[in-house]
Amino acid sequence: QVQLVESGGGSVQAGGSLRLSCVASSGRTFSPYVIGWFRQVPGKEREFVIGMSWNKDNTYYGDAVPGRFTMSRDNAKNTVYLHMNSLQPEDTAVYYCAASVKYTTTYDTWGQGIQVTVSS
């Protein structure tokens, strides 16, 4: 069973940067179809931020993703990162790491989420 654990969240002032990490633990080789980041604000639907193929150089961007966000991965460490720069108060949300471990286009495995708060 795969577990995804996010870290690196917290509070930052507007204009600051944060890097979220997501580490996957698995009893066997971790090789999802895609892995990505979502975010959710209370009272709103969870929205897709950014995702990437695990074994290819494909990156997918959500409709609302700012150009200030990028994603990287370290396959050897089973880890992906969300690099968030020039953060704004509207980026405040719970951020979730998710992966498609069943090798479909659906994200079927989720982390517990981590809070990011941006103050003005």
Image (spheres, rainbow, N blue to C red):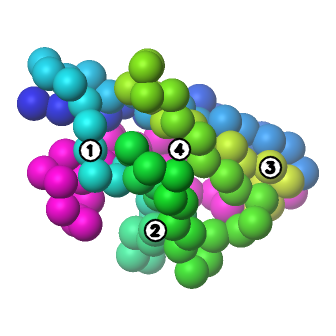
Task: Measure the C-alpha gap from mark 3 to mark 4.
Answer: 16 Å
Any part of residue 37 in sight: no
Disc 2: which residue: 48
For the record, the magenta segment spans 91-120
The C terminus appears in which quarter of the rendering? bottom right
The residue labelled by disc 3 is: 85
Label 3 amino acid?
Asn
Instruction: Report the side of 69 relative to 9 (left or right).
Output: right
Q: Earlier in the sequence, mark 2 or mark 1?
A: 1
Q: Name the mark nearer the viewer: 2 or 1.
A: 1
Residue furthest to the right in view is: 15
Q: Position of residue 94 (x, y in %)?
A: 49, 52
Q: Quadrant of residue 68?
A: bottom right
Write down the residue under mark 4: 115
- The amino acid marked with disc number 1 is Pro
In the image, residue 10 above or below residue 104 = above
- The image position of residue 74, as x and y in percent, is 51, 28
Tag 4–tag 2 contact (CB < 8 Å): no
Residue displayed at 50% across by 59% down: 58
Q: Earlier in the sequence, mark 3 or mark 1?
A: 1
- Residue drawn at x 43%, y 28% is 75
Residue 32: image tag:
1
Disc 2 secondary structure class: strand
Nearer mark to the viewer, of 3 and 4: 3
Residue 1 place in picture, x, y as percent: 10, 30
